[in-house]
Amino acid sequence: MSGYLINQARIGTLMVAVMLSGCVTTPQTRDELKTTMKEHPDLSIADSYTANRPFDAVVGMIERKWDECYNVRNTTTRTEGGMTKSRIRDTYHPKSHKVNNSLVEMTLQMTTEGMTTLNKVPPGGEYRVALDIVRLPGNKTKLTWYSTAGWAKSWEINKQWSNGKNVACE
């Protein structure tokens, strides 16, 4: 899992470079992340999926797996000549917010220690993923995912979780 999330941090850094070039600004809110991902389809995922499971079952599984899989800290150490030159620590913060009985918003943010960032980091860290979980009629549930393109594998795994498959973390 840690290697995958380190790769996600690198992709996030690439996205920041694009933002600094003037194409995009760093999202400061969850809604800004969603808007940015919709406006830049070549760099992102803004996709929906309908699970054939009840809303409460889907939310329970997703919340449990997000806590298990995304509540992590990764440290990257750069050494030269046997000496540590830098240590960067990325900490992921999964959050769940029940808006009402038909909508739960899942959000993944990341904080970084040991590196100077040029962009303004929002409270709670840089936004990495937003997932809206919506109750549908007929015991179905709609998931809508927003992230950079590097999170495609995570999106596929989240779809499996929504169907009740206890797929392992990456």
Image (spheres, rainbow, N blue to C red):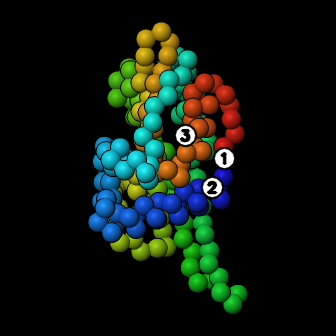
Left or right position of 12 against 67: left
Q: Quadrant of residue 167?
A: top right
Tag 1: Cα neighbours inside 10 Å, few (<14), some, or many (≥20)? Answer: few
Q: Is residue 93 visible in the rendered structure shown here? A: no
User: Residue at left 38%, top 64%?
Assistant: 18
| Nearest to N terminus: mark 2 or mark 1 | 2
Disc 2: which residue: 4
Q: CA distance from mark 2 to mark 1?
A: 7 Å
Q: Do labels 2 and 1 touch, CB within 8 Å?
A: yes
Disc 1: which residue: 170
Q: Quadrant of residue 23?
A: bottom left
Q: Is residue 75 above or below residue 128?
A: below
Q: Do labels 1 and 3 touch, CB within 8 Å?
A: no
User: Residue at left 35%, top 24%?
Assistant: 100
Q: Secondary structure at mark 3?
A: helix
Disc 3: which residue: 155
